[in-house]
Image (cartoon, helix red, strand yellow):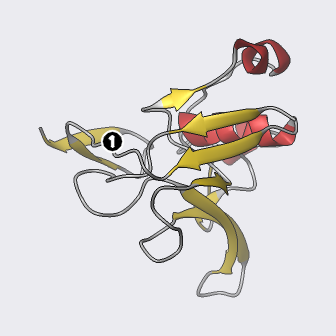
Amino acid sequence: MSRITSGESGSSYGSSTPAIWKDFVYADENGNKLRSFRPLFDGEFQPGQLIEVDAVPMGCCLIKTEVFRNLPRPWFYWTLGRDASMLQGDISYPIQVRQGTHGCSEDLYFSLRARERGYRLLCDTSVLVRHESQGVVGGEGRMDVIEA
C-alpha cells in the first residue's frame, strides 16, 4: 500500500491549530447525522512523529506519481457550495458542513479519492508550514482572503 505524506502539521491560517484532519460523524440540532472533518489539535498527536490521518491539506505534500496515475480525474475538485443534486453519487456528497450543504474543498476531495483507492495519508508532525494569508469560505463556497 502506498502512502501520501503531508508536511502540514503546523499552523493553519496563522494559529496553533494543526491543519490535519480527522473524519467524524455528528448530529445537527435536528438529530440529522452529518459527516464532516475536524482538525486534530495539540495533545491529540505527538510532535515529531509520522501519523496516519483521514485527510491532508495540499500546501506541502509529497505524492508519488503513481498515485495520480491510479486516481480518476479530476484529482482536485472544489464541490463545497454546489447544488446537492449535482453531487448525487459523488464521493464528496456525504460531507456536510451543515444540514443541506454538501461538498468539500479540493484538498479534502483528493484525500477522499486517495483513501477510496487504498492509499494511506500520513503526516509528518515535525514539519511546520504556515499560510501566507488567512481566508474564510463563505456560504457560496467562495474563499475570501481576510488577512495577507
Of all residues shown, which one is farthest toward the front? 48
Q: Residue 5 in the image: state x and y as whole percent.
A: 61, 36
Q: Is residue 27 visible?
A: yes
User: For mark 1, what is the residue?
Assistant: 129
Question: Is 112 placed left or right of 105 in the picture?
Answer: right
At a point 84% along the width and 18% down the height, the residue shown is 70
Q: Is residue 89 visible?
A: no
Relative to 59, is 32 above or below?
A: below
At a point 34% along the width and 40% down the height, the residue shown is 143
Quadrant of the image occupied by residue 21:
bottom right
Quadrant in which the N terminus is drawn: top right
Quadrant in which the C terminus is drawn: top left
- Crowd rating for badge 1 (residues with CA inside 10 Å; few <14, some 14–19, many 20+): some
User: Mark 1: which secondary structure?
Assistant: loop
Q: Nearer the viewer, residue 1 or 17?
A: 1
Relative to 42, is 104 above or below?
A: above
Quadrant of the image occupied by residue 108:
top right
Q: Residue 39 in the image: state x and y as whole percent.
A: 49, 63
Q: Residue 60 in the image: state x and y as whole percent.
A: 44, 32
Question: Is 102 placed left or right of 15 in the picture?
Answer: right
Relative to 103, is 107 above or below?
A: above
Residue kind at label 1, given as amino acid type? Val
At a point 29% along the width and 63% down the height, the residue shown is 16
Quadrant of the image occupied by residue 121:
top right
Q: Residue 32 in the image: state x and y as whole percent.
A: 72, 79
Q: Nearer the viewer, residue 36 or 5?
A: 5
